[in-house]
């Protein structure tokens, strides 16, 4: 089994970059969707409400989702290294989740804060909170590095700049070929 975790702040273009994974036989699994499926069993009405739950409830749902995904075989996991909550940044890859997933590689997809803000402004499908994008990307790097230390995974950074998505996808393909 091979697990590749792909992270990035909301609006960076993770899903677009990850589309290349299927050509290498990986199943793409959205961690938030899996977590939401677990949360729905407890009455959570929409995905954006999950980050407003008590931290303890979010942590329990993370663990449940990590355990479920770890049973799926070769996967690319679309997730967040950190989630901005009312009480601060919560690890999206806490010890119990990252150990259950046991990734080979953790990939951070990044872009400039202005590019990300522009993408977010065009996406009416989600209720996004405003945040300091540069700070959030730095927190993601720190959390991804910590997760890598716990599991022995490598960390790669892919730059997904405006009008250069093909370059970002090619960077991801090279990571998957290794």
Image (spheres, rainbow, N blue to C red):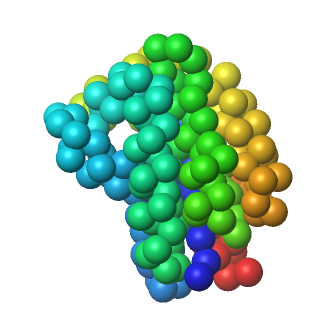
Residue drawn at x 60%, y 50% as measured from the top left: 96
Of the 4 image quadrants, the one containing the C terminus is bottom right
The residue positioned farthest toward the top in the image shown: 87
Above or below: residue 20 compared with residue 42:
below
Name the residue located 69 percent from the left edge and 74 percent from the top edge.
174
Q: Residue at (57%, 29%) from the top-left corner?
A: 90
Quarter holding residue 170: bottom right
Q: Quadrant of the N terminus?
A: bottom right
Residue 116 locus on image (x, y percent) = 51, 33
> Residue 48 appears in which quarter of the rendering?
top left
Comparing 133 with 154, the one in front is 154
Q: Which of 91 and 173 is in front in this view?
A: 91
Report the number of numbered marks.
Answer: 0
Report x, y in % for residue 41: 21, 47
Rendered view: 163 above or below 104: above
Residue 73 appears in the picture as rendered: yes
78 relative to 62, above or below: below
Q: Is residue 161 visible?
A: no
Which residue: 52% across, 31% down?
83
Q: Nearer the viewer, residue 148 or 169?
A: 148
* Relative side of 73 to 111, left or right: left
Give the x, y percent position of residue 24.
52, 84
Asked if residue 18 is positioned above or below residue 141 in the image, the reply reads below
On the image, the x and y values in percent for residue 124 come to: 24, 31
Please give left or right for residue 104 compared with residue 124 in the image.
Answer: right
């Amino acid at each position: 089994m091979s697990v590749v975790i792909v992270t990035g702040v909301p609006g960076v273009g993770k899903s677009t970059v990850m589309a290349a994974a299927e050509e290498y036989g990986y199943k793409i699994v959205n961690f938030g969707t899996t977590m939401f499926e677990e949360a729905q069993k407890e009455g959570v009405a929409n995905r954006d409400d999950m980050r407003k739950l008590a931290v303890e409830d979010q942590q329990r749902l993370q663990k449940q989702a990590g355990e479920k995904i770890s049973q799926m075989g070769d996967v690319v996991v679309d997730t967040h290294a950190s989630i901005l909550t009312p009480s601060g940044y919560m690890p999206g890859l806490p010890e119990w989740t990252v150990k259950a997933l046991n990734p080979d590689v953790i990939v951070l997809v990044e872009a400039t804060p202005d590019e990300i803000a522009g993408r977010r402004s065009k996406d009416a499908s989600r209720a996004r909170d405003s945040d300091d994008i540069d700070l959030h990307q730095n927190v993601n790097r720190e959390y991804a590095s910590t997760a890598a230390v716990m599991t022995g995974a490598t960390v790669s950074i892919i730059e997904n700049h405006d009008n250069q998505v093909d370059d970002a996808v090619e960077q991801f393909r090279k990571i998957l070929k290794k």
